[in-house]
Image: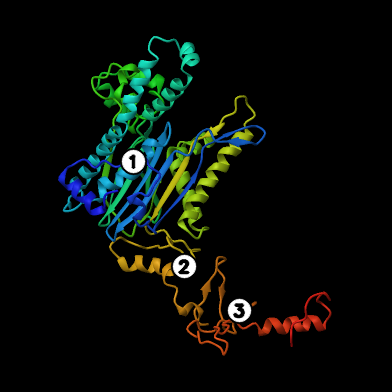
């Protein structure tokens, strides 16, 4: 694996960086610090049964990252893979390399940043197709071995070849949506392909939360996408009727070589004068982040589509934002907020299935779900004093606020144990040594008093005298079983 400096030099020189991003070994992105102002919730796909049992139709195919590269640069992404995880895994690891390894250096204007994002998407797809060159060659070789045989004959004579051909074909079909958010010097830039979604919530002049969907859904019912496809010579009505090409319903994605390399073989795409399914992203930004910015949501389509199907609502964005605001007032961490919203949508969707007595029922299954929350200025009133990600009223550039957020975990000092400063526990109660505190007390000596006794042991810093006194009184009152060992007086 090349070093970070080597990767930067390669990217600046314009040379291709060939890395095996599919190996389950250590990735350079594993060393990037996770952004403490973000949280993620998720759920694997499920299919329901009337008897209450559920099962997964496939492995979890969503991927995500949330990085704090430096004090001025934050990068987030959600990827919804289809036909396996190959493309989503590749994009999750390669996208940061195409953004954070020197490409932003010297870029100040919004159009320059947007150009970096656009080229990153195209470079990721190009790199992915280069990574499957061997699979494409193997597929052609396997097809030649079966040439001239009917399917039943091939299965009887060469079952292993048929099985391998199926596996290779699925890997080649792998693709993914992508929605990424870059916060650079307090400006937000958003890029997406596919139907994963981004919502930005801000406070308007009337102190109410306004919702802006920053990402268009690149699907076959999107009028802008239909216009683009019609300009390529395609029959829009035919596209509206089929609503799908191959194994996907998105008009833009990363990967899926089967459609992009062979779109002429698909009835609703065969008349296109150029590539109809593309990896070119829609990009917005920079959007200035200020004290009115509340939070950003990135999500795979499994979240909002499950809510749409269960409720029939056409305004699920508002429903999801209301759920997020509700959980901000109840949870203590951003991961807790995100997961609580996901769990609530799961219950709504499953309840809709149970209530529906028709055959077939609606809401019979749901897809993988990922929800990422990036907090700006939405308070977490129940956040613990030692909780990462609970910062509120933070605007990028104020590094002292970020440092304060992290100090609770990494540098608990003796003031927490000096009998003066409350130490907050998981239930938000505090342990102090002051006589004014109500209820049971644990008395701490100063954590700096670590002198040794005559036997060379550290003296006890917890006073159990009250406990022993209470036990002795219990013995005297006959409240302790006789077979218990009586403590020494």
Cα separation, mark 3 vs mark 1, equals 51 Å
Looking at the image, the residue that sits furthest to the bottom is 454
Residue 386 bears which disc, if any?
2
Do the residues bearing badges 3 and 1 touch, measured as CB atoms within 8 Å? no
Above or below for 275 versus 433: above
Do the residues bearing badges 2 and 1 touch, measured as CB atoms within 8 Å? no
Badge 3 marks a residue whose secondary structure is loop
Q: Residue at x 54, y 46 (%)?
A: 343
Cα separation, mark 2 vs mark 1, equals 34 Å
Residue 199 bears which disc, if any?
none
Badge 2 marks a residue whose secondary structure is loop
* Disc number lying in front (2 or 1): 1
Quadrant of residue 71 in the image?
bottom left
Q: Label 3: how many residues lie within 10 Å, few (<14), some (14-19) or many (20+)?
A: some
> Percent position (x, y) of residue 314?
45, 36
Residue 442 bears which disc, if any?
3
Cα separation, mark 2 vs mark 3, equals 20 Å
Do the residues bearing badges 2 and 3 touch, measured as CB atoms within 8 Å? no
Residue 277 located left or right of residue 332: left
In the rendered image, which residue does mark 1 sit on? Answer: 91
Q: Label 1: how many residues lie within 10 Å, few (<14), some (14-19) or many (20+)?
A: many
Answer whether residue 290 is visible to the viewer in this image: yes
Q: Residue at x 82, y 77 (%)?
A: 479
> Percent position (x, y) of residue 460?
58, 83
């Amino acid at each position: 694996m090349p070093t970070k400096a080597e990767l930067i030099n390669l990217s600046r020189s314009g040379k291709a960086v060939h890395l095996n991003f599919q190996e389950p070994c250590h990735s350079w992105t594993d060393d990037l610090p996770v952004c403490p102002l973000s949280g993620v919730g998720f759920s694997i796909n499920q299919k329901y049964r009337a008897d209450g049992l559920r099962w997964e139709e496939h492995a979890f195919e969503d991927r995500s990252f949330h990085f704090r590269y430096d004090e001025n640069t934050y990068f987030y992404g959600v990827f919804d893979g289809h036909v396996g995880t190959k493309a989503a895994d590749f994009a999750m690891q390669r996208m940061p390399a195409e953004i954070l390894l020197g490409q932003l250096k010297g870029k100040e204007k919004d159009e320059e940043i947007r150009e970096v994002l656009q080229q990153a998407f195209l470079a990721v797809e190009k790199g992915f197709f280069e990574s499957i060159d061997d699979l494409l060659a193997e597929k052609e070789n396997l097809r030649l071995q079966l040439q001239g045989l009917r399917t039943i004959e091939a299965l009887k004579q060469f079952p292993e070849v048929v099985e391998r051909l199926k596996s290779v074909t699925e890997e080649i079909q792998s693709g993914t949506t992508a929605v990424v958010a870059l916060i650079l010097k307090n400006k937000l830039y958003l890029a997406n392909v596919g139907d994963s979604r981004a919502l930005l919530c801000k406070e308007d002049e009337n102190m109410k939360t306004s919702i802006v969907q920053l990402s268009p859904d690149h699907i076959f019912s999107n009028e802008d996408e239909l216009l683009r496809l019609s300009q390529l010579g395609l029959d829009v009505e035919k596209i509206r009727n089929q609503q799908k090409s191959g194994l996907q319903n998105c008009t833009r994605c990363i990967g899926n070589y089967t459609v992009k390399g062979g779109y002429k073989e698909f009835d609703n795409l065969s008349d296109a004068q150029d590539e109809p399914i593309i990896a070119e992203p829609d990009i917005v930004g920079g959007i200035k982040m200020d004290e009115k910015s509340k939070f950003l949501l990135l999500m795979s389509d499994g979240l909002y589509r499950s809510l749409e199907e269960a409720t029939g609502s056409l305004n699920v964005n508002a429903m999801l934002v209301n759920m997020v605001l509700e959980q901000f007032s109840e949870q203590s961490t951003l991961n807790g907020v995100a997961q609580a919203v996901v769990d609530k949508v799961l219950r709504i969707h499953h309840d809709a299935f149970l209530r529906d007595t028709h055959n077939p029922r609606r809401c019979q299954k749901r897809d993988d779900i990922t929800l990422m929350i990036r907090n700006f200025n939405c308070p977490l009133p129940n956040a613990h004093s030692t909780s990462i990600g609970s910062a509120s009223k933070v605007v990028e550039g104020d590094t002292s606020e970020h440092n304060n957020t992290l100090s609770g975990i990494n540098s608990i000092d003796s003031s927490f144990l000096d009998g003066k400063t409350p130490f907050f526990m998981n239930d938000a109660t505090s342990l102090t040594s002051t006589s004014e505190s109500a209820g049971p007390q644990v008395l701490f000596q100063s954590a700096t008093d670590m002198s040794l006794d005559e036997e060379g042991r550290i003296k006890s810093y917890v006073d159990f005298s009250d406990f022993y006194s209470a036990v002795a009184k219990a013995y005297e009152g006959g409240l302790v079983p006789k077979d218990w060992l009586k403590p020494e007086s």
